[in-house]
Image (cartoon, rainbow, N blue to C red):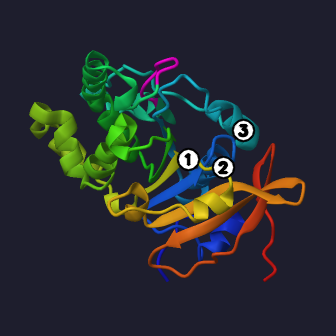
Amino acid sequence: MTHRIETGITQLDRMLGGGLLPGTLTVVMGATGIGKTQLGLAFANAGAAQEGERGILFDLTARGDSQNHSEYASRMFNWDLKEQPAGQKLLTDSIWDRGITRRDCLHLFRYQGRRVTASDMNSDQWREWKYEQARKLDQTIGFFYGNFVHGVRRCVMDGIEPTDRAADSIQLEVFEYVYQQILRKEHDWVARDLFRAQFRENAEKIHKHEYNHEQVACLLLYTSHEVMLDDLITRPIESGDLLSNANTIILMGKTREGNKIGRALQVAKHRGSACDESIVPYTIDDQGLNLATNES
């Protein structure tokens, strides 16, 4: 049986045929407030039991909205998130020091009230934003690589805001860079991007801290315009769309039965594995998501 990555939610793992597949991208899609963050934290926390290290959180929120990561992590798992300060680039000789490098989260952008789309900015603002993006890529590489060499094998990427055109979103642009140039690249090539001229002098330590990038699982929390689950299920997926490239898609939305509103999720796609595609209601409490038992 193929090794599975547990989500931290037993009933969801059953729906996924035992869990997620390592080395793949999972997209969790739903509107603000539907429970994506709680699911993401459950997934990250489950790394402690399965791999010996909790996962990491990479927050791309740009409008200053709180994702409540710290509050939820503390309440749900007694987990005190240690954040890498935005704008603080790790010195390359600090990478091997776990006490300095091993951090739970990085909130890359902190712009109060600004949406991150080309259509919301003038040309000068867009150039400034692109410069900011480029300047922070080194910090981003250091954050991921520094955690992976110390045993982390799962990451949650949060804060992707909805746009009418994916090409307008700098957040999706950053995500694509991280996914293709960090998560899906062999460890020594990521190290080359990070160390550059100092690669050779760090070669022995790089080899000693080798990790298998094919064992790294990524969960992307994607905020949708759609609120109702039925609308998410019927949402068209275009060729080249983020969803078309994901191995697994989990939809979370509201449901209506008469005058009652509830929440439910559905596994819309789980390539390479059998899965339960039922619509499963869930509730949220202080401990996170509670999925109803599927009796069918």
Q: List the residue tagged with mark 3.
A: 78
Q: Residues within 10 Å of mark 1 (few under 14, many from 20)?
A: some
Name the residue type under label 2: Val
Q: Which residues are magenta?
A: 107-114
Is 114 in front, or is 148?
A: 114
Q: How many marks?
A: 3
Q: CA distance from mark 2 to mark 1?
A: 7 Å
Q: Which tag is nearer the camera, tag 2 or tag 3?
A: 2
Q: List the residue tagged with mark 1.
A: 224
Whole-percent x, y for residue 11 in the image: 72, 68
User: In the image, 114: left or right of 192?
Assistant: right
Check if mark 1's residue and mark 3's residue have beta carbons within 8 Å. Answer: no
Q: Is residue 97 above or below residue 17?
A: above
Asked if residue 235 is among those painted magenta in the image, a careful observer would answer no
User: In the image, 278: left or right of 155?
Assistant: right
Q: Residues within 10 Å of mark 3 (few under 14, many from 20)?
A: few
Name the residue type under label 3: Asn
Q: List the residue tagged with mark 2.
A: 227
Residue 207 visible at all: no
Check if mark 2's residue and mark 1's residue have beta carbons within 8 Å. Answer: yes
